[in-house]
Image (cartoon, rainbow, N blue to C red):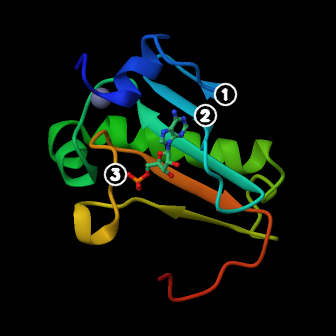
């Protein structure tokens, strides 16, 4: 989609600070980080939100989830197969949840204590 910010980042039309890339998944640092590590993990193909991707291609959602964990390990947020110190994966759907880009993305957050419940 030519008017989608994240599709344009996948296409290389807008710069991205890429930390992980596979055939079908891209991960890059959030431009406005909310934690010492804040990475966005997206399918390279356009899907509007979490539910749309889950319905259209659950295997791809699994690849996105796997990449999110790989990023957390790479960033030192958790040991592979371990549980500490820890990280959080968040995805927002719709305006009330704060979704501002309509291309599914998982936020991977860590590097500080994360309050619960989120705001
Ligand atoms: P959300 O509000 O959940 O849809 O998340 C969208 C995220 O995209 C926000 O955390 C923004 O800071 C981030 N963002 C917007 N533009 C860019 C960009 N050019 N590069 C990296 N992250 C971006
Ligand atoms: Zn898109």
Image coordinates for residue 78, horizontal then vertical, percent: 78, 59
Q: Quadrant of residue 88?
A: bottom right
Of the two numbered discs 1 and 3 in the rendering, the one whose residue sits closer to the viewer: 3
The residues tagged by marks 1 and 3 sit, at their Cα atoms, a distance apart of 19 Å
Circle 1/circle 3 CB separation < 8 Å: no
Dot 1 beta carbon under 8 Å from ligand 1: yes
The residues tagged by marks 1 and 2 sit, at their Cα atoms, a distance apart of 5 Å
Q: Is residue 39 left or right of residue 37?
A: left
Q: Tell me the SS state at disc 3.
A: loop
Q: Tell me the SS state at disc 2.
A: strand
Q: Is residue 26 left or right of residue 19?
A: left
Residue at mark 3:
100
Image coordinates for residue 69, horizontal then vertical, percent: 62, 49
Residue at mark 2:
28
Does 97 sit above or below residue 10?
below
Tell me if mark 3 has few (under 14), some (14-19) or many (20+) residues whose alpha carbon lies within 10 angstroms of its own: few
Dot 3 beta carbon under 8 Å from ligand 1: yes
Q: Tell me the SS state at disc 1.
A: loop
- Compare residues 39 and 66 and report the one nearer the observer: 39
Q: Quadrant of residue 67?
A: top right
Does 115 sit above or below residue 95?
below
Tell me if mark 1 has few (under 14), some (14-19) or many (20+) residues whose alpha carbon lies within 10 angstroms of its own: few
Residue at mark 1:
17
Tell me if mark 2 has few (under 14), some (14-19) or many (20+) residues whose alpha carbon lies within 10 angstroms of its own: many
Q: Earlier in the sequence, mark 2 or mark 3?
A: 2
Q: Quadrant of residue 116?
A: bottom right
- Compare residues 32 and 45 and report the one nearer the observer: 32
Name the residue located 35 percent from the left edge and 61 percent from the top edge: 92
Dot 2 beta carbon under 8 Å from ligand 1: yes
Q: Earlier in the sequence, mark 1 or mark 2?
A: 1
């Amino acid at each position: 989609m030519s008017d989608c910010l994240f599709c344009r980042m996948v296409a290389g039309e807008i710069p991205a600070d890429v930390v992980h890339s596979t055939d079908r998944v891209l991960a890059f640092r959030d431009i406005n980080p909310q934690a010492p590590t804040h990475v966005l993990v997206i399918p390279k193909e356009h899907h509007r939100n979490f539910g749309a991707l889950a319905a259209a291609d659950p295997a791809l959602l699994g690849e996105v989830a796997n990449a999110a964990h790989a990023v957390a390990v790479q960033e030192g947020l958790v040991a592979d197969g371990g549980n500490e110190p820890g990280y959080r994966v968040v995805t927002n759907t719709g305006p009330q949840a704060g979704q501002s880009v309509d291309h599914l993305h998982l936020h991977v957050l860590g590097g500080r204590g994360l309050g619960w419940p989120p705001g």
